[in-house]
Amino acid sequence: MRPHTARKRFGQHFLVDETVIDGIVRAIDPQPGEALVEIGPGLGALTHPLLQQCQALTVIELDRDLAVRLRKQAGLTVVEADVLKVDFAELAAQHAGRPLRVVGNLPYNISTPILFHLLDFSAHIQDQHFMLQKEVVQRMAAAPGGKDYGRLSVMLQWRYRIEDVLDVPPEAFDPPPRVDSAVVRMVPLPVDGTVDAKRLSELVTAAFSQRRKLLRHTLGRWMEANGMQQPFDLQRRAEEVPVQEYLALARQPPT
């Protein structure tokens, strides 16, 4: 079989460092019988060691040529599709309702849309382990008050416990990306049914729409337009507000 050339349009950077691969597999610790799903398996660097430990694995691959290769591997169920269009609730149903363990070396050019897509299915997920750009992981796990804390931080931290588990240098890939990478662990928190997710997304987007301005110029105007008069300190910038305060605001109905 001819060698596969990485394709820029798919954001392909194939993991080749065996030490790093072993570290990721140990962090995931897959067990037989678990509903394991890998996004973007590529040439199978993670796929094969994961399969050795769990015996069965579902992979989501957009590249048709790679999907053909993967179908030749026993124990793999190949979903040839754009991950942004995959219904993970349906995947969980296909695994007898077992919560999914989702892993992958995500394409860096669409990693944030993938994270937000999976957010809608967090109730069906046991945990997630992803290789991402190091800068993205820092933003995901950032605490209030720092330059990395933003919309991504709030929208993920309200649904997940986030942990940076492994740093990965560019030379661990072929071709090497121009950025440092990291593996993040995301464990869903219990579903908070008192929070309107759509409302939270809207108010957080408004708050961070102009980071340098005080919230009275951004979130304050959104609150006024949505009939909200609740006490809230708008003499701060968006990055100074903890996740729990955004959640408390999202719980309150318009007046």
Image: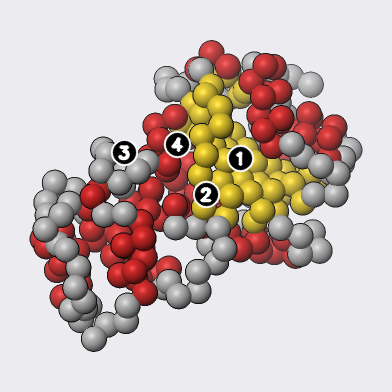
- Chain-order first, disc 1 or disc 3: 1
As drawn, which residue projects farthest toward the top? 171
Label 1 crowd (10 A; few <14 / some 14-19 / many >=20): many
Residue 203 or residue 8, whichever sits in front? 203
Which residue position holds label 2?
A: 161
> x, y (%) of residue 49?
78, 29
Q: Secondary structure at mark 2?
A: strand
Tell me which amino acid carries mark 2. Arg
Q: For the point 44% across and 57% down, which residue is it?
A: 158
- Chain-order first, disc 4 or disc 1: 1
113 left or right of 89 in image = left
Q: Is residue 253 visible?
A: yes
- Chain-order first, disc 1 or disc 2: 1
209 left or right of 47 in image = left
Tell me which amino acid carries mark 1. His
As drawn, which residue projects farthest toward the bottom? 255
Q: Secondary structure at mark 4?
A: helix
Tell me which amino acid carries mark 4. Val
Q: CA distance from mark 4 to mark 3?
A: 10 Å
- Chain-order first, disc 4 or disc 3: 4
Q: For the point 70% across and 64% down, which residue is it?
A: 90
Contact (Cβ within 8 Å) of mark 4 with mark 1: no
In the image, residue 178 sits, relative to residue 66, either above or below, namely above
- Chain-order first, disc 3 or disc 2: 3
Q: Which mark is residue 137?
A: 4
Q: CA distance from mark 4 to mark 1?
A: 11 Å
> x, y (%) of residue 210?
17, 51
